[in-house]
Amino acid sequence: DIQMTQSPSSLSASVGDRVTITCRASQGISNYLAWYQLRPGKVPKLLIYAASTLQSGVPSRFSGSGSGTDFTLTISNLQTEDVATYYCQKYYSAPLTFGGGTKVELK
Amino acid sequence: EVQLLESGGGLVQPGGSLRLSCAASGFTFSSYAMSWVRQAPGKGLEWVSTISGGAGSTYYADSVKGRFTISRDNSKNTLFLQMNSLRAEDTALYYCAKAYCATAPCYSSSPFDPWGQGTLVTVSS
């Protein structure tokens, strides 16, 4: 099975900072990669699919890139409401594995 | 508006069984694959199972294969997860989620959007 590895597992940044989270697949998955945001007490929210397509309603400060095995989620101007844990997921084929998550906190 | 409402969670002893339900509304249920995802306390998201829109294909995580069964009743717009031989490590918040795609039908190889509020399953003696 394909493994999904996220890094870092946690990070601390200031409001306005640019934040980058990486996700690596153990085998190529083309662009079948999604990013989710899980805020405390909330339901997981789809941010990006097809590696770089922003889901409707998601602020444009979020962006995704990559293809094959290496992917990136970038938050260009961190806001307080972005405090959350972020997960990548491959949906190329079952198992639809999630990465381990990256917890984003404010400095 | 798409709505997903899980139910059926609760406290069960190790080795016991539980059946989760997810009532869906606001979309053509039979045209979309549906999934279950769980989050154990203090842990990350774990994909559990997916079923195609017509119920012809099902997929399971290795951790639940042979113990859990996903099914759906398209006449009642409801998704199910039958959980048998429950273990302490199955303790988690269980979410149902709809496959997302630009145009239906939406297959199993799709991201998840939206998600339900979740139902808590606790396996303990």
Image (cartoon, coloured by chain):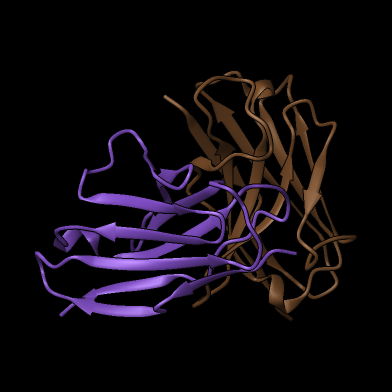
Chain colours: A purple, B brown
| Vertical side of B15 occupied by B72: above or below | above
Residue B7: give x, y in percent of width and height: 61, 46
Quarter of the image that includes the C terminus of chain A? bottom left
Q: Residue at x 67, y 42 (%)?
A: B21
| Vertical side of A8 occupied by B109: above or below | above
Label total for image: 0
Quarter of the image that includes the N terminus of chain A? bottom right
Residue B78: give x, y in percent of width and height: 68, 32
Q: Residue at x 62, y 52 (%)?
A: A29
A41 relative to A82 in the view: left or right: right
Residue B124: give x, y in percent of width and height: 70, 78
Task: Between residue A36 and residue A32, name the one nearer to us.
Answer: A32
Query: Residue A54 occupies which quadrant of the picture?
Result: top left
B70 relative to A96 in the view: left or right: right
Q: Is residue A43 visible?
A: no
Q: Residue at x 74, y 81 (%)?
A: B125
Q: Residue at x 66, y 50 (%)?
A: B8
Query: Residue B61 occupies which quadrant of the picture?
Result: bottom right
